[in-house]
Structure formats: structure tokens, C-alpha cells
Amino acid sequence: MNAGAIAGLALAATLAACAMGERAPPPKPFAGTPWRVILELPLAGETPYVRFGDGRMEGFDGCNRIAARYVEDSVGAHAIAIGRIETGRHACDRSAQAAEDRILEVLQSVSSYAITGDAMTMTGSAGTLRFRAAAGKGKP
């Protein structure tokens, strides 16, 4: 084996050892964390977000404030059902209205969620929404 190959193996072993020593950050808590919706195209103005706690979801969908009751499993399987979503009736520009329609469609159909570090995905029959935890407990 030549010196280049040995150096390459040593580098690979070092990188693997470093990767094994790094631990992923613990997942953010589902309840109480303000979760910002990750959109393909960002909106001007306030970022859509949701926050869950005590069986109630509240937030902003890109156009209007939203609120709903939800039921979460009690055994840790990350199953969830969101009840009828109440929303405001403000008129919005086309892009904000499209974001609102999509967010409401997916949230209304959500059946499960998964959290890894500060990222959450919610999935249901209408598709998937991705979220990123906002810093702090207040509005993102």
C-alpha cells in the first residue's frame, strides 16, 4: 500500500470517529414550541407558524390567525388529529392566500408528526408540512 492510500485511510478513520462522537441535539418539545412553517417560496411579512399545547393549536397561516383543538396519542406514537380549524377572514395577496390554503389543507388532514432536533414534519392524507423550531416561547 502506498503512502497516499494509507493517509486516505487514516483520514477516513478519523472522520468516522469524529462523526460517531457527535450526537444529534435532543428533539424540541412538541408542545409549547413555536414551529415556523418552511415554505418553498418565502412570503413577505410574518412567517406562518403553529404552536401546540394543552389540546389547543394556535398560529398564523400566512394570511390569518388560526386556532383549533387537537388530540394527541398518549403512548408516544406521535399520532395526532386536529379538529376544525378556525381562521380569520382577512383578504390577502395571491401568494399568501395560496400558502394559507395549502397549510390549512395539510393541517386539517394531519395524522402524525416526527421531530428530529429542531425540525418537525407533519404528515397526513393531503401531504406533508415541514417546520423549524423558533427560538423562545413567544411568537416566532
Image (spheres, helix red, strand yellow):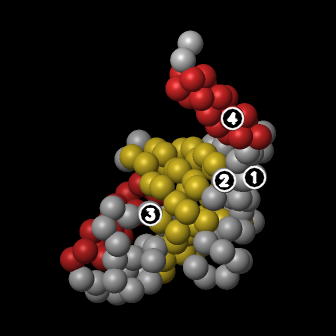
Give left or right: position of 119 versus 125.
right
The alpha-carbon separation of the residues under discs 1 and 3 comes to 20 Å
Kindly identify the amino acid type of the residue bearing the numbered disc 2.
Gly
Q: Is residue 90 above or below residue 70?
A: below
Give left or right: position of 53 versus 46.
right
**Image depth: mark 1 or mark 3 in front:** 1
Tag 4: Cα neighbours inside 10 Å, few (<14), some, or many (≥20)? few
Tag 3: Cα neighbours inside 10 Å, few (<14), some, or many (≥20)? some
Q: Are marks 4 and 3 in contact (CB under 8 Å)?
A: no
Residue 26 numbered tag: 1
Q: In this view of the protein, which residue sits in the foreground, 16 or 67?
A: 16
For the question of whether residue 89 can be seen, the reply is: no
Tag 1: Cα neighbours inside 10 Å, few (<14), some, or many (≥20)? few
The alpha-carbon separation of the residues under discs 4 and 1 comes to 25 Å
Could you tell me which secondary element the residue under label 3 belongs to? loop
Residue at point 63%, 50% (across, down): 115
Residue at point 52%, 50% (across, down): 122
From the top left corner, tell me how far across and down residue 117 is, in percent.
66, 53
Kindly identify the amino acid type of the residue bearing the numbered disc 1.
Pro
In the picture of the structure, the residue carrying the numbered disc 3 is 38
Q: In this view of the protein, which residue sits in the foreground, 36 or 112?
A: 36
Which residue is most to the front?
Answer: 3
In the picture of the structure, the residue carrying the numbered disc 4 is 14
Q: Which of marks 2 and 4 precedes in the sequence?
A: 4
From the top left corner, tell me how far across and down residue 75 is, in percent.
78, 39
In the picture of the structure, the residue carrying the numbered disc 2 is 117
Q: In this view of the protein, which residue sits in the foreground, 96 or 120?
A: 120
For the question of whether residue 22 can be seen, the reply is: yes
Kindly identify the amino acid type of the residue bearing the numbered disc 4.
Thr
